[in-house]
Image (cartoon, helix red, strand yellow):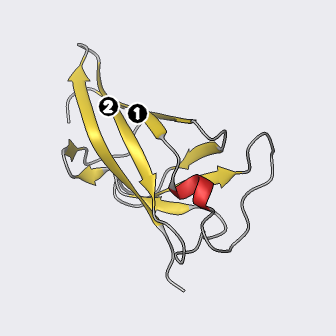
């Protein structure tokens, strides 16, 4: 089975004089795609995001209650989103992506130092 990826849309970006800030919506691919233990790839390069380096800070808010954390990669294009069950410290199992996750409204806030 193919592994799911996370995509970014609805991007609002601004520079506050110190940092490049980004607010966006994250969508996770639906079943039959699978969740990969350790996280799914989140590409923060392209699609309106012009970051060529890893963000300093990334935060997610899930309406369905999932806990998500960003694991930096070697570049802005290969970081991971690790997903934990709602109200739990247990990572999702390597299995089909739950409908509640692929249908979730996930907001992301990310910060890069300086201009990109």
Left/right placement of residue 108 relative to residue 44 reads right
The answer to the question of whether label 2 and label 1 lie on touching residues, with beta carbons closer than 8 A, is yes
Left/right placement of residue 61 relative to residue 113 reads right
Q: Indicate the position of residue 50 as horizontal and vertical percent values.
A: 20, 44
Please give the residue where the numbered disc 2 appears in the rendered image: 22
Most extreme residue toward the bottom is 1
Give me the disc on residue 40: none
Q: Nearer the viewer, residue 48 or 107?
A: 107
Q: Indicate the position of residue 106 as horizontal and vertical percent values.
A: 49, 41
Crowding around mark 1 (Cα neighbors within 10 Å: few <14, some 14 to 19, many 20+) is some
Crowding around mark 2 (Cα neighbors within 10 Å: few <14, some 14 to 19, many 20+) is some
96 up-or-down from 29: above or below: below
Q: Residue at point 41% right, 61% down?
A: 78
10 up-or-down from 74: above or below: above
Please give the residue where the numbered disc 1 appears in the rendered image: 110
Q: Indicate the position of residue 99 as horizontal and vertical percent values.
A: 59, 60
Q: Residue at point 67% right, 68% down?
A: 37
Q: Nearer the viewer, residue 82 or 87?
A: 87
Query: Exactly how many numbered labels are in the figure?
Result: 2
- Distance, label 2 to label 1, CA atoms, is 5 Å
**Between disc 2 and disc 1, whose residue precedes?**
2
Q: Secondary structure at mark 2?
A: strand
């Amino acid at each position: 089975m193919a592994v799911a990826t996370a995509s970014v849309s609805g991007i609002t970006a601004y520079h506050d004089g110190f940092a490049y800030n980004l607010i966006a919506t994250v969508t996770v691919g639906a079943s039959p795609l699978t969740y990969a233990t350790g996280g799914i790839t989140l590409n923060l390069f392209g699609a309106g995001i012009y970051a060529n380096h890893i963000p300093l800070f990334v935060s997610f808010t899930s309406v369905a209650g999932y806990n998500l954390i960003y694991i930096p990669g070697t570049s802005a294009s290969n970081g991971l989103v690790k997903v934990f069950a709602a109200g739990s410290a247990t990572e999702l199992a390597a299995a089909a992506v739950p409908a509640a996750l692929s249908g979730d409204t996930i907001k992301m806030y990310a910060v890069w130092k300086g201009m990109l």
